[in-house]
Image (cartoon, rainbow, N blue to C red):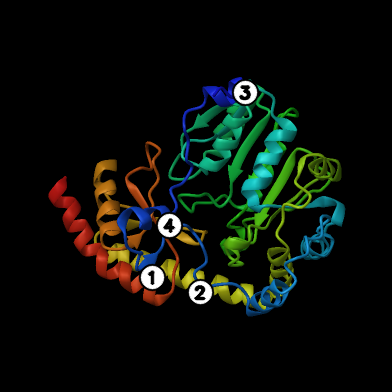
Amino acid sequence: MSRPPFTPTIASLPKLVPFVGPEALERARGRPFSARLGANESIFGSSPKAVAAMREAAAENWKYSDPENFELRSAIADHHGVAIENVVVGEGIDGLLGLTCTMFLTPGAHVVTTDGAYPTFNFHVRAHGGVLDLVPMHDMREDVPRLIESAKALSARMLYVSNPNNPMGSWWPAEAMTQFIGALAPETLLILDEAYVETAPEGTAPPIDISNPQVVHYRTFSKAYGLAGARIGYAIGESSVIEAFDKVRNHYGINRVGQIGALAAIRDQAYLRDAVGAIAAARERIAAIASANGLSPLPSAANFVAIDCGRDAAFAEHVLKALLDRDVFVRKPIAKGIDHCIRVSCGRDEDLDVFAKALPAAIEDARRLS
């Protein structure tokens, strides 16, 4: 039986899977992981106040969420010192990235991003028919000056920068980011993904200028707030840009329990500070474990640490596989120039104990295979 044809853009795309989830790996392996350190979730969990609010909300999950996200947007606006008209809530940053492409991207338009940066953004660009122009990392961080030069040369419609960066954990200070923003060509929208900014040093996030329609800041409750399963993200920008999201977003796309949990979470900044402290301590321990085994941890402002395995990509792949075989779920970058690293998410002491025990044997296995 025949079917209607896909659009030319979709028909031309190969089968793409941005990430293979740990659940899929566990199904293939036939057993669970002992340490889940690959998805950059906050294993420390969310605010107990958020958990209590979500537990109470579950009894009324027969209701839809508030399609205007009014209370949550109000709380976010208060937290950042902007108006509610400058805030849109979406299904994580991922959902908002897709909507941004719908709003700004036409088939054939150029989009500049870093080779090896967050692949889900590339997924959305390809699905909308955009042309990806990839700039290599420099010194293990996004080469923002070159990104801006490339965007200017190509009259790019969009420029994607993550600060701090995933998968390396590197970052630019706010002062530098402000200078970069000032250098944007007028036809380019800067997508500033700040998913990990809560775990970054003070002075990393540039000021939010809601008068500038060229910059949209993207934040999430999935990382430091510990609500990855709730799928709640938000964007802050100039009011006419934010208003346009209402033309394309799924107004009932947010789940009500997550909406209520996020509201409680942003109101509990004391818990967030504790979680950020636990993440910082875990970064230090991951770095110590790596160094004790002759590997080189990279400085990180995120809730993970990238570790230079000291050889080539094949060696790092062997280390990764050996860790997976020992029930430790981690990931690694795949782009050339950073593919000799693995990436380990922050975890509790008991999670990092498993990693510390498995790593020496994993490295020994990798050496035998190299």
Are circles 2 and 3 on residues that touch, CB within 8 Å? Answer: no
Are circles 2 and 4 on residues that touch, CB within 8 Å? Answer: no
Are circles 4 and 3 on residues that touch, CB within 8 Å? Answer: no
Q: Which mark is residue 4?
A: 3
Q: CA distance from mark 2 to mark 4?
A: 25 Å
User: In which image quadrant can residue 69 be found?
Assistant: bottom right
Q: CA distance from mark 1 to mark 2?
A: 11 Å
Q: Which mark is residue 285?
A: 1
Q: Is residue 144 left or right of residue 210?
A: left
Q: Position of residue 276 (x, y in %)?
A: 56, 70
Q: CA distance from mark 4 to mark 1?
A: 26 Å
In primary-sequence order, the first of circles 2 and 3 is 3
Seen in the picture, residue 124 relative to 42 is either above or below; the reply is above
Which residue is outermost to the left? 368
Viewer-side residue, 3 vs 20:
3
Q: Which mark is residue 45?
A: none
- On the image, numbered disc 4 is attached to which residue? 23
Q: CA distance from mark 2 to mark 3?
A: 52 Å
Seen in the picture, residue 276 relative to 163 is either above or below; the reply is below
Looking at the picture, which amino acid does disc 3 mark?
Answer: Pro
